[in-house]
């Protein structure tokens, strides 16, 4: 599996947090923080928008690093991604992503 596919199947190469980090793009950090704040109903600051990818070494957003239940579950079970889990299709944890993102599900089942 491609290293920049997250545990949940999202493609980190397309993530604005990773793009902002790689390009040290503060305008994109601000835009992403504002969007994620609105989407999640919690304050996310531009300083939190630093990530090299969910399964790579280096910076991670505070949510991805410490709070993401999908990442915690997959790491705890020793899986490369949720695609390795026999419960993928019935899992409500990763289903938060895959139920409304066909690309993420496809990335996990390739």
Image (cartoon, grey):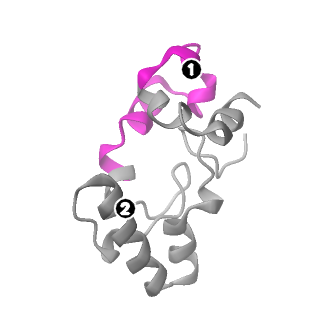
Q: Is residue 86 left or right of residue 64?
A: right
Which residue has dot 2 on it?
A: 36
Depth order, front residue of 7/29 = 29
Q: Position of residue 106 (x, y in %)?
A: 71, 34
Q: Is residue 86 left or right of residue 71?
A: right
Q: Residues within 10 Å of mark 1 (few under 14, many from 20)?
A: some
Depth order, front residue of 79/11 = 11
Any mark on residue 52, and which?
A: none
Q: Secondary structure at mark 2?
A: helix
Q: Position of residue 29 (x, y in %)?
A: 42, 77
Tell me which segment is drawn in magenta: 65-92
Q: Position of residue 12 (x, y in %)?
A: 59, 56
Quadrant containing the C terminus is top right
Evaluate whether residue 70 shows in this view. Answer: yes
Q: Tell me the residue at 33%/69% (across/down).
A: 48
Any magenta on residue 91?
yes
Which mark is first along the chain, 2 or 1? 2
Q: Tell me the residue at 70%/38% (across/down).
A: 107
Q: Residues within 10 Å of mark 2 (few under 14, many from 20)?
A: some
Which residue has dot 1 on it?
A: 88
Q: Is residue 57 above or below residue 29?
A: above
């Amino acid at each position: 599996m491609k290293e920049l596919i997250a545990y949940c199947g999202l493609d980190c190469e397309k993530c604005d947090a990773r793009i902002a980090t790689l390009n040290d793009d503060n305008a994109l950090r601000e835009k992403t923080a504002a969007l994620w704040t609105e989407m999640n109903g919690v304050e996310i600051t531009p300083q939190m928008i630093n990530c090299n990818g969910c399964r790579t070494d280096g910076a991670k957003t505070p949510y991805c690093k410490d709070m993401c239940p999908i990442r915690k579950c997959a790491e705890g079970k020793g899986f490369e991604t949720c695609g390795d889990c026999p419960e993928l299709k019935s899992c409500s944890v990763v289903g938060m992503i895959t139920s409304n993102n066909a690309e993420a599900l496809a990335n996990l089942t390739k």
